[in-house]
C-alpha cells in the first residue's frame, strides 16, 4: 500500500500544523514539503489539521482520495 | 552590494516569514530584527486557545540556534523610535542607529484598551504571551470572566474559558457578534452557539462603570445590570503600532503598500497588521489583521527584496477554533448581496456561501474543513470574472 501526499503550494500558508502532527512526513519552512510517509490514518490526521486545507492524501493503489 | 542588509522593525510572523524566505533563497547580507518583546519571535494564535487552556505548547517559531546558524541578529526588548528614510537609518529607543538597504515595517498592532479599565490589576487585553499567561492564571473553575467585545478574539476566549468551567459574560455594543463582518444571520448563529454553551451575552450593551479597588469587582452595564467580575478581558480590536513613524510622512492608520509590500519610500516595505495592502477585489488599500495575510505579506516582501516574481496566492483564509469546532472564513462577505446556507447550523455543520449577483465572493465554513479547497476555487474563479 502506498499513499501520495500533495501540497497545494498556492494554498499553503506554512502554518506548521501538519509538521506538528506528523513531523516524520512534513517539514515546514516558508512552505510545507513532504519528507517522508506514515500510515494513512496519520496522514489524514495531519491533512485535517491544516487550517488552509492545503493537503491532499491519495491512496495510490485504488486512486481513492482520502482527504479532503 | 547589499552591505547594510535588511532591518525589520517588529518580531512577529511577518518578520519571521520574510527572514526565512530571504535565507532560504540565499540572501547573505545581514538581517536584523528589532523585537519589542524579550522572547524569541513566536506564534500568536495559540494565545487565545491552547496556551490559555493551560496546555504546554512551544510558541517560538525557531530556537535560538536557528537565528545564530542563519546569521540573523535578534535585538530583543528593543523598540523602533524613528525612521530617517533619506539616510536609510532606523533609530531605536535605546539611541542606536541601524543603517539598512531594506527596511520592513512589521510592528504589528496593539489592542485597543478602554481607558477606564486600564488601572485594574485583573483587566487585560490579549496580545502577548505574558497577557495569555496572566489570563490563564485567572481562569479557574467558577471564576467570573467578563469579556468586552464579541469579535473573534473575544469569542475564542469565551469558548476556551467555558471549557475550563469559567462563568463567562460577553458585553457587546453591537446587537449581534461579528455582524459587521458576516451579517445578521450568521451573527445570530454565533450568538446562539455561545448562548447554548452557557455564555451570557449582553448585546446592544455598553459598560457604564467599572467598580472596584485595585481590581475590577463588578461592572455596571448600560442597561443598569450589575455583573460581578473576577477577570476582565477587553477585546475591542487593535490599532497599528506606528507612532514611531510620525515624522515619516507614511499613513499611520496602516501603511499603504502594493502587492509586493512596497511603501512610497525607497527601500521601505510594510507587512502584517501594520500594513494596508492594495486589495484588487475591493479596489482599495485594506488592513486584514489575519495570520495568513501576515505570513503571505512577509514572504512577498522577501520576494521583492530578492527580485523574484511573487508567488501567485489563493484567497487567504482565516480560521477560528471554538468549542472544538473549526470555523474558517475566506473572501469578502461585505461585497455580497445574497447568502445561501448548506448543511445544518443547529449541529454546527454547515457552509455559508456569500454571492454578489450570483458570483461567489466569500464563504464561512463551520465544522467542514474538507470543503475549504472547493470554496477557495469557487471564490478564486468568481474574482476572475
Image: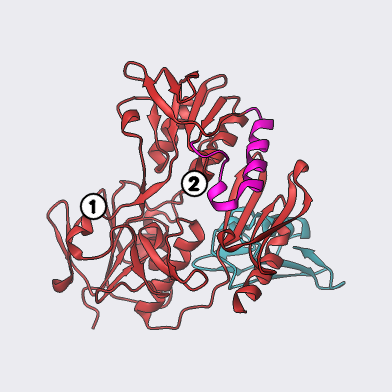
B98 or B67: nearer the eye? B98
Q: Which residue carries the number 1 mark?
A: B79
Q: Position of residue B154 (x, y in %)?
A: 51, 39
Tag 1 subunit = B
- Element type at mark 1: loop
Bounds of the magenta segment: B173-198
Residue at the spot 39% in from the left edge and 74% down from the top edge: B258
Q: Position of residue B36 (x, y in %)?
A: 28, 50
Q: Which residue carries the number 2 mark?
A: B58
Tag 2 subunit = B
Position of the C terminus of chain B, as image quadrant, is bottom right
In the rendered image, what is the letter of the chain coloured red?
Answer: B
Q: Are marks 2 and 1 in contact (CB under 8 Å)?
A: no
Q: Position of residue B212 (x, y in %)?
A: 36, 16
Q: Residue B86 is drawn in which quadrant?
A: bottom left
Q: Residue B346 is drawn in which quadrant?
A: top right
In the rendered image, what is the letter of the chain coloured cyan?
Answer: A
Amino acid at each position: 500500500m502506498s499513499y501520495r501526499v500533495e501540497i497545494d503550494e498556492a494554498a499553503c500558508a506554512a502554518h506548521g500544523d501538519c509538521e506538528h502532527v506528523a513531523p516524520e512526513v512534513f517539514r515546514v519552512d516558508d512552505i510545507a514539503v513532504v519528507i517522508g510517509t506514515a500510515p494513512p490514518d496519520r496522514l489524514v490526521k495531519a491533512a485535517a489539521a491544516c487550517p488552509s486545507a492545503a493537503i491532499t492524501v491519495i491512496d495510490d493503489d485504488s486512486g481513492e482520495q482520502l482527504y479532503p | 552590494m547589499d552591505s547594510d542588509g535588511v532591518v525589520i522593525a517588529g518580531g512577529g510572523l511577518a518578520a519571521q516569514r520574510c527572514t526565512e524566505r530571504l535565507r532560504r533563497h540565499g540572501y547573505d547580507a545581514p538581517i536584523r530584527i528589532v523585537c519589542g518583546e524579550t522572547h524569541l519571535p513566536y506564534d500568536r494564535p495559540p494565545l487565545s486557545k491552547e496556551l490559555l487552556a493551560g496546555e504546554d505548547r512551544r510558541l517560538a517559531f525557531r530556537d535560538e540556534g536557528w537565528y545564530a546558524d542563519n546569521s540573523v541578529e535578534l535585538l530583543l526588548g528593543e523598540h523602533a523610535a524613528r525612521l530617517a528614510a533619506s539616510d536609510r537609518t532606523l533609530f531605536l529607543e535605546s539611541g542606536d542607529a541601524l543603517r539598512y538597504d531594506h527596511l520592513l515595517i512589521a510592528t504589528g498592532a496593539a489592542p485597543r484598551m478602554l481607558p477606564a479599565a486600564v488601572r485594574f490589576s485583573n483587566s487585560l487585553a490579549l496580545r502577548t504571551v505574558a497577557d495569555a499567561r496572566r489570563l490563564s492564571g485567572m481562569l479557574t473553575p467558577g471564576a467570573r470572566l467578563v469579556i468586552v467585545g464579541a469579535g473573534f478574539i473575544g469569542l475564542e476566549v469565551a469558548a476556551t474559558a467555558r471549557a475550563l468551567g469559567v462563568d463567562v459574560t460577553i458585553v457587546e455594543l453591537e446587537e449581534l457578534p461579528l455582524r459587521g463582518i458576516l451579517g445578521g444571520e450568521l451573527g445570530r448563529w454565533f450568538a446562539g452557539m455561545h448562548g447554548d454553551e452557557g455564555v451570557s451575552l449582553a448585546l446592544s450593551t455598553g459598560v457604564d462603570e467599572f467598580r472596584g479597588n485595585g481590581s475590577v469587582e463588578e461592572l455596571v452595564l448600560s442597561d443598569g445590570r450589575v455583573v460581578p467580575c473576577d477577570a476582565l478581558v477587553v477585546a475591542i480590536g487593535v490599532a497599528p503600532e506606528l507612532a514611531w513613524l510620525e515624522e515619516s510622512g507614511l499613513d499611520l492608520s496602516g501603511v499603504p503598500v502594493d502587492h509586493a509590500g512596497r511603501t512610497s519610500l525607497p527601500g521601505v516595505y510594510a507587512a502584517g497588521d501594520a500594513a494596508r495592502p492594495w486589495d484588487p477585489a475591493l479596489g482599495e488599500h485594506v488592513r486584514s489583521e489575519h495570520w495568513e495575510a501576515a505570513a503571505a505579506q512577509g514572504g512577498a516582501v522577501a520576494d521583492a527584496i530578492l527580485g523574484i516574481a511573487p508567488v501567485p496566492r489563493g484567497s487567504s483564509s482565516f480560521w477560528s477554533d471554538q468549542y472544538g469546532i473549526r470555523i474558517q472564513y475566506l473572501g469578502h462577505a461585505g461585497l455580497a448581496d445574497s447568502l445561501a446556507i448548506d448543511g445544518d447550523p443547529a449541529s454546527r455543520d454547515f457552509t455559508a456561501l456569500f454571492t454578489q449577483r450570483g458570483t461567489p465572493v466569500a464563504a464561512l465554513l463551520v465544522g467542514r474543513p474538507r470543503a475549504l479547497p472547493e470554496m477557495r476555487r469557487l471564490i478564486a474563479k468568481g474574482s476572475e470574472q
